Amino acid sequence: MRTTIATVAALAAIALAPANAPAEEMALKFATLDSPMAHLNVHIFHPWAKRMNEIGKGVLKIDVRDGPAVANHGNVYQRVIDDVVQIGWGLHSSVAGKFRLTEAISLPLIGDRSAVASVAFWRLYKSGILDSEFDQVVMLRTNIFPPSTVQFRAKPPTIETLEGRKMAITGGEIVSSMVKSLGGAPLSFRPGELYEVLQRGTADGAIIGWTAFQPFKLAEVTSYHIDMPMSANSGQIFMSKPKWAALPAAVRNLIAANATEKESREFGVFWDRVREEGIGLVRGKPGHTVVEPSPEMIAKWRQRFQPITDEWLKKNPGGDKVLAEYKRLLAQVAAGS
């Protein structure tokens, strides 16, 4: 197992504690929200908790709480603030009205690969430009999900617009505005409802990412796919600032040593792999068509979406600086810097 220099330093601090000090193992409850066998738990959250428990044995215990009994996406932020759980996983968009500038990452046609976007967003967070929104929590790891794309039950009359199409969405105001700008009618549903919605024809299609294809079996109810990177969403593993500040220095340093850009990059790499698995369920398969949008089509849709970005900038003072910096960081990370 590779151990970082920072981790070694944290462990050394623990080892140098007074010999007669009582050995207290600090337990921190971690709400993952999903079932134990969910791919996020199996590949990301459980291995991280196991690693922390191994290197911090006798000092730190991450007590994983799977499922929605302790917290769910709607309340996990407040549960962490209230110290019901000490570490949480959740979406920024699930905290109503809190992360308005962070929403810049969800604006139309920004970014593509999750690994690049996740590192760019981590750097954006660490720059301090979002401090006004992260006044209550410390982010330990982040990811930008692969962007949502356009999925249809059957071949649409045209792929130039969504005119007359009813489109199921799982995103918020930005995604809804994107559908409307292309002439479609957005219908809001939870991801778990999409299979039935598409199967019954309640909607003609959905704006949803490839990462939803495995868990929700969407390849069974779609056949025509436009691989246009519409809008992304972000998530975080986080602690409250008061709890973070109250941790013994050695414990805090141990967690910090394993909450770096590297971990956010790995999170993004995981999602890119899931995306490829999702698109692999339909690409080249009988009955399915995957359309790669031409530069001309992307340019046309970008022009349609520009008023959405303009309106967002108007409503969010300082958003212009955040958006410009995020785009700069995306280019920086994509170039290998």
Image: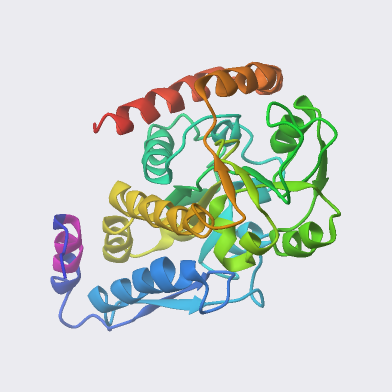
Residue 108 on image: x %, y %: 60, 29
* Rendered residue at 64%/75% (across/down): 70
The residue lying furthest to the front in this view is 286
Is residue 87 left or right of 203 when viewed as pictured?
left
Q: Nearer the viewer, residue 290 or 111?
A: 290
Q: Nearer the viewer, residue 257 or 161?
A: 161
Residue 187 on image: x %, y %: 83, 46
Q: Is residue 317 visible?
A: no
* Rendered residue at 13%/56% (across/down): 5
Q: Is residue 13 magenta?
A: no
Q: How many marks?
A: 0
The quadrant of the rendering that contains the N terminus is bottom left
**Quadrant position of residue 118:** top left
Q: Is residue 151 visible?
A: yes
Vertical relation: 330 (above or below) 194: above
Most frequent secondary structure within the magenta stretch: helix
Q: Nearer the viewer, residue 126 or 202?
A: 202
**Quadrant position of residue 68:** bottom right
Q: What colour scheme governs how the chains and residues are painted in the rendered image of this protein?
A: rainbow
The quadrant of the rendering that contains the C terminus is top left
Vertical relation: 195 (above or below) 55: above
* Rendered residue at 38%/63% (across/down): 247
Is residue 67 left or right of 204 when viewed as pictured?
left
Q: Nearer the viewer, residue 1 or 125?
A: 1
Residue 281 on image: x %, y %: 51, 60
* Rendered residue at 15%/81% (across/down): 19
**Quadrant position of residue 12:** bottom left
Residue 29 on image: x %, y %: 50, 74
The region drawn magenta spans 6-12
